[in-house]
Amino acid sequence: MDSKTLTSGALIGLMLAGGLAAAVSAQTAATETGLTEDEVIAIALAEVPGEVRDVELETEDGQQVYEVEIIGADGIEMEVEIAADTGDVLEVEAETDDEGDDD
């Protein structure tokens, strides 16, 4: 085998390993919380239709919650908090610049 073939094979192996690690990570998050990111997005969009900008899994007061940022049709940025274990919507609020967000 020449060095190009070995290098190509190594790169492909690394890419596949990275993809596998990402899939395992997503599956682990879903297993730990009981919800997939797609399910969380669907729940959030049912509350606030618009374009999802960000989804984060955080711990608040000892409870895992998903925070989903959505830009509504009116241009207002909304945040939907969803309980990671049950899928219950905990809070829906407009994002404001004074919350420490640098955007």
Image (cartoon, rainbow, N blue to C red):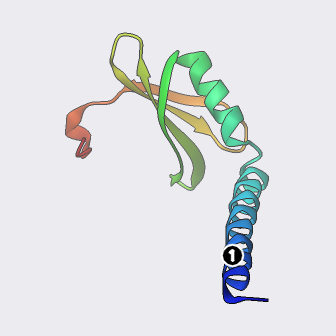
Q: Is residue 67 above or below residue 72?
A: below
Q: Name the residue under label 1.
A: 8
Residue 101 horizontal/vertical position (percent) = 26, 44
Secondary structure category for the residue under label 1: helix
Q: Is residue 82 above or below residue 29?
A: above
Residue 83 horizontal/vertical position (percent) = 63, 39
Residue at 52% x, 52% y: name it: 58
Left/right of residue 87 with respect to residue 74 in the rendered view: right
As rendered, which of 48 and 20 lies closer to the eye?
A: 20
Direction left: furthest residue: 98
As rendered, which of 21 and 8 lies closer to the eye?
A: 8
Direction front: furthest residue: 2
As rendered, which of 37 and 2 lies closer to the eye?
A: 2
Q: How many labels does the image show?
A: 1
Left/right of residue 50 with respect to residue 71 in the rendered view: right
Residue at 56% x, 56% y: name it: 62
Residue at 74% x, 77% y: name it: 9
Quadrant showing the N terminus: bottom right
Residue 70 horizontal/vertical position (percent) = 45, 27
Quadrant showing the C terminus: top left
Residue 41 horizontal/vertical position (percent) = 62, 31
Amino acid carrying mark 1 in the image: Ser
